[in-house]
Image (cartoon, rainbow, N blue to C red):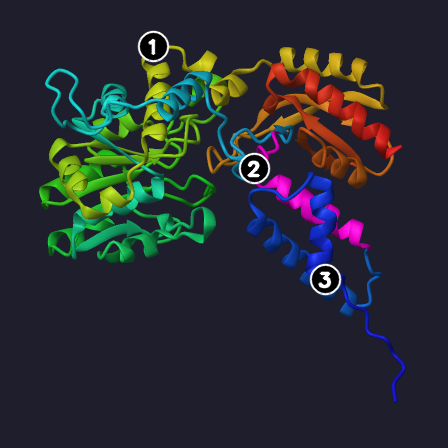
Amino acid sequence: MSTETRLHPPSVEAILVAVRARLGGEPAAAATLAAIARDVAADERERLSSGAQPRSVDELADSVASQFEAIDAAPITTINATGVIVHTNLGRAPWPQAAIDAAAAAARDYLLLELDQATGRRGARFRAAEDHLIALTGADDALITNNNAAAVGLAVGLAGRGGVAVSRGELVEIGGGVRIPEIIRRAGAKLIEVGTTNRTRAADFEAPLLDGRARVVLRVHPSNFRQEGFTEAPDPEQLAVLAHVNGAIVVDDLGSGALLPTERFGLAHEPMPSERLAAGADVVTFSGDKLVGGPQAGLIAGRGDLIAKIRRDPLARAMRPDKVTLAAVAATLALYRTGRAETEIPVWRMIAASSAGLRERAAAMVKAANAPSEVVATEATVGGGSLPSEILPSFGVAIATGAADALLTALRLGKPAVIGRIEGGRVILDLRTVAPDDDGRLGAAIRAATAANG
């Protein structure tokens, strides 16, 4: 007969008794508390079965209490010191203050969302963002969706059950494993591949256009990679003429969709929506939370009849944003119309920041860090699938104290969480992606992390 004693966790009720003592009695959400206690007990049972040391009732109660209190805790704010401006894992573009204020007002109050102020009758859904987009792109009409994948899906839906012709070099995969061929198929259209991976000409589109198989020509900007060497892409104007002669329409997915000329900041030229519309595109689509620098949204602009058709698509209702997003997008686009984008939209402020200014900030931070550190030249990127391989010279702080992995972890686990990178055995904090107003918080985070890391 085996004398082995199997360990069991404390009962759920025993854990709850200890939790109530910590929380000062029975909380209003007793059912929620009990559910968490059951999960903690189950986790402890699994730990014990794998040979782990048992935790006390008080330790388990602490775990339950902390999980309960975390339910309504505010998100942990993060300082992005990676040098990647549009960082997908950190929420992409930080919003301009104007967008934050507009979103707060829309969330707090009622809004004339679908009510005409002059007549008092039901009117078109909040149009301010779309009116700004029309003015900025020269389009006939515009529509806002909840993201650019939705915008592309609605736009290729213009093909109906017909064909969508795409260059093989533009059948890309975007974030989250979403692929252009799948978007086309889910829209109910037929994918028609033309050209080759590295070289496609306007003439490659002739056959499916001449025989009527292709109703839409889709151009996809390869936002997150770059082809170099023996490559060729069709001229936008030539392709538009060919499509229009054969009764097809051109949809141009621009990905990030710059509304300011990127070459002004020493970067490669990024196609602008107004340019592609002027070159013959019938519809352009792009993101709201990348180079535009605002909330997540899909922006569609183009011919009035086509936008009207997209607006009538039943899926458009499923893909429309709420009043808060619409208000924030409108406020962001208004900054472009009033000439304040470069100074008030964080993405463009970061892109435009001077190397000299970044070096001065880094020197001040090294002086205040109270840790073995130095100013270091770095290379920042736009990120978010925008302008791949383009580099922005930058400056940051290199910290060499203790184990770099441990220091990076300590910074990440702090409040605020600081996200940096390791190069040459040192933690590097790039200041191009840190707002100047956050320098004080970053300095305090460095001091706390280095003190904890020895």
Q: CA distance from mark 1 to mark 3?
A: 64 Å
Residue 145 is a magenta residue: no
- Seen in the picture, residue 24 relative to 396 is either above or below; the reply is below
Q: Point out the tag, 3 or 2, that comes first from the N-terminus.
A: 3
Residue flagged by tag 3: what amino acid is it?
Ser
Residue for badge 2: 72
Start and end of the magenta stretch? 56-77
- Seen in the picture, residue 325 relative to 219 is either above or below; the reply is above
Q: Main secondary structure of the magenta part?
A: helix
Circles 1, 3 touching at the beta carbon (< 8 Å): no
Closest to the observer, 141 or 40? 40
Specify the quadrant that holds the N terminus. Answer: bottom right
Closest to the observer, 265 or 66? 66
- Seen in the picture, residue 86 relative to 393 is either above or below; the reply is below
Residue flagged by tag 1: what amino acid is it?
Thr
Closest to the observer, 41 or 357? 41
| Residue 434, position as x, y percentages in the image | 61, 22
Whether residue 125 is visible to the viewer of this picture, yes or no, is: yes
Residue for badge 1: 338
| Residue 160, position as x, y percentages in the image | 16, 53
Circle 1 residues within 10 Å: few <14, some 14–19, many ≥20: few
Circle 3 residues within 10 Å: few <14, some 14–19, many ≥20: few
Q: CA distance from mark 3 to mark 2?
A: 26 Å
Residue flagged by tag 2: what amino acid is it?
Asp
Q: CA distance from mark 1 to mark 2?
A: 38 Å
